[in-house]
Amino acid sequence: MATASSSSAPYYVVNGAPGQSTIPAWLTQRSKNKKGKKRAKTERTLGHVELIQHFEFPEASLKIRTTPDGHHAMATGVYKPQIRVYDLDQLTLKFERHTDQENVDFMLLSSDWTKSIHLQADRHIDLHTQGGLHHRTRIPHFGRSLAYHTPSCDALIGASGSDVYRLNLEQGTFMSPIEMQRGTAGVNAIDVNPRHGLWAFGTERGEDGGCVEFFDPRARNRIGLLAMPVEQLRPLTSVVSEFDFKPLAVTALSSKMDGLSLAVGTSTGHTLLYDLRSPKPFALKDQGYGLPVKKVQWIEGGHRVAKEGLVASADAKVLKIWDKEEPTTNFTSLAPPTNLNDFHHLPGSGMIMVANEGVHMTTYYVPQLGPAPKWCSFLDNVTEEMEDHQGGGLSNYNDFKFVEKAELASLGLDHLVGTPTLKPYMHGYFVSLKLYDAARLVANPFAYAEHRERLVKEKLEKKAESRIRARREDVKVKVNKGLAEKVKKDEERRNAKKLKQASSRKEGEEGEGDAEEVDEQGPGESLLKDPRFAAVWTNPDFEVDMGSREFLLKNPVAAPVRGKTAVEEEEDESDRRSSDPDDSESEGSESEDSDAAGELSAFDPRTMPKSQNPMYRPLPQPQSGPRPKLVAIPSDLEHSSRAPIASSSKPTTFGQRIKSQARSGASSSKDDDPSAAYSKGVISQKHLGGGAMEMSFVPQTAPRRNNKGAEAEGILDDDYDEKREEREAAREKKKSGVEEFGAGLEKGGREPEDDVQGRQKRRTGGRMASGNVFRGL
């Protein structure tokens, strides 16, 4: 049994090949005879179910009907032209009867199959009984449609031309024909209303367009005329050329049991629904293919859905079932494998029989239309089981396994590509299920053990789920812990701000309503508990890589600090010592300072209130006290280009002493300077040939600087006294806490009572604004 389902109602194919089947040809099997030499003519498909045996014709089926009592079905087909009757209670063929010509249409004259009338393609009308052909007569023109009026026993035959022939079966003679309008090319459809017996004839009138003419069977006169909306139907077609012009004609008619609704099918592929009290259609359905509508039928009773106005319309391609209230949507669509010729819905059930151009006639079962007929009531149970197994039942691929190329190579079966063992299909292959199991066992001998271990683990996990656990409100963060902490702090700060605003509004008289609204709204749902972002905190795939280039470009502050080399650390240490001579004292007092006061990263002025933030305070006024002043440079160091700046008592280098000797020698020759004797006694040099130089050094102790020494050096007493006073003032400053450093700069010396503003301790852990320091140059 094949099944099909989509967004519309599901249906099941219980006879014939399923529509639009994609079953590969290698899945079909041919039965063999006992000897196994020749194959039989019949073929069967795996998983295929035949509800009615021999429900087929050698070439094609033309028309199909069921008897009013519901026990038999009659169908006509070719080739050879024949009539077949099926016993539905026995689900098999009852008999077949051959005819001389193909059948155009037929009607059942009794409640069973024993009496029927057939319109043949050679203008003959055949009357069949239980014993066979009972009588044959002929009409002047080729027939197109057939109907039977039970109260008057009149058989109505529509043919080419403007006449409708009436054959009275009670009297056995032709009655006067019914004449259509002048210009009628033929009568394509005839309908007898089942409620009041009104006759309706669908005509073809060439360029004027077809119409529906109504006659009263009691007076046999025309009582109404229903014109088709030509302007509304023709623009919907794609035919614009005069050579491809197709006249609008009525091709199918069907009346509902209520006696007021009429369905009209046209040659343009449209179905119009009319109320006999109005000349305008209240619903319009387009089949979509532009092919003539072959048959329309109202679905009467039995359907399980709450829809009473279902209509079935069919062209050569598709059979559509739709609701009169919503003609644009389909209740379901049935597409037979070949062109459709006729269909018949069994009243009060969900079964539809279709005659088509293929060998097998097709039978569809739509459970939502109604229950299965009594003679096949088991279909309800079968379809329920199929729905429970998600469309299971007999599967076409039950004995095959689909394997992709990668899995095929892992199993070691890739060498079978190109052999009949592997059936190529889509992006892989179908392989026998037994071969697949054997290959998987050889490739992985521990597959059973792994499978057993997996089952045990699943059972343990299922038992663990039933345990009672304490409910945790906090979200378990496995990844992005830093981001989660930041989000949590931001939410706490935002919630505190909202609560503060709510409390401030509540204190005021005007903001009482706003405070109540804030209290009702609450702080809001946390981002950590939002199920949409749960994977960010648990799935490692969403972990933020803080070392990636994209993250560093977007967050340059979070870039890691590069470690310093040994040379850079040594330079920084020397710079620190040269710029901070009292480093030893600061190191001693380091234990007295708190870590929070010295850490630069711990101080964040943005998180402090404005009233307590020192960044918003006015700058302190300058205090009175000693200010930095420059130190006078001695006259003997002022003319030396390489003389030391920080202190005059520092010993000079060899090069400076040589230059001093040269200058002192020159001055002694001219001015007889007493300092020349000291310079000459210290260093002597001699230039040799070739650019060489020889020098000797006689160590001596410099004379103590007093008044006599000042006179020996040629320094005035006033200058010497002034320098001595400066040295004494420097000692006093050092005692009072004033220290000198650099190029005559000094620090300290403030009074204890001064209110010092600003930082009192040295910053640690931060980078200096500049790496340049005074190096005594």
Image (spheres, rainbow, N blue to C red):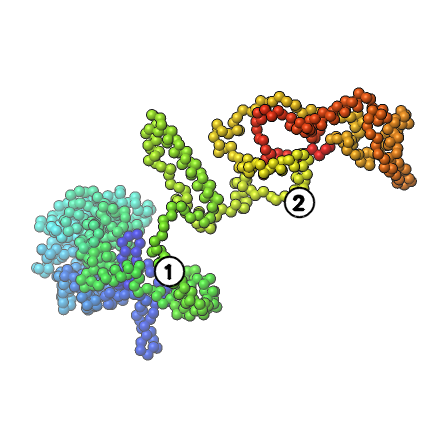
Above or below residue 374? Residue 565 is above
For the residue carrying disc 2, how many other residues have a C-alpha within 10 Å: few (<14), some (14-19), or many (20+)?
few
Left or right of 713? Residue 736 is left
Residue at left 36%, top 67%?
399
| Residue that appears at 18% across and 66% down | 89
Image quadrant occupied by the C terminus: top right
Q: Earlier in the sequence, mark 2 or mark 1?
A: 1
For residue 566, the mark is 2
Q: Amino acid at mark 2?
A: Ala
Asked which secondary structure carries label 2, the reply is: helix
Asked whether the residues under the numbered discs 2 and 1 touch, taking CB atoms below 8 Å apart as contact, a structural biologist would say: no
Of residues 719 and 64, which is closer to you in this image?
Answer: 719
Residue 110: % across, % down: 12, 61
Task: Classify 10 Å Cα crowding around label 1: few (below 14), some (14-19), many (20 and above).
Answer: few
Return the x and y of residue 544 as percentages of the image width and height.
49, 46
- Of residue 673 and residue 568, the one placed in the foreground of this image is 673
Q: Which residue is nearer to you in this view: 233 or 204?
A: 233
Residue 439, numbered circle: none
Q: Check the image and report above or below for 97 versus 731.
A: below
* Viewer-nearest residue: 230 or 136: 230
Q: Which residue is mark 1?
A: 460
| Mark count | 2
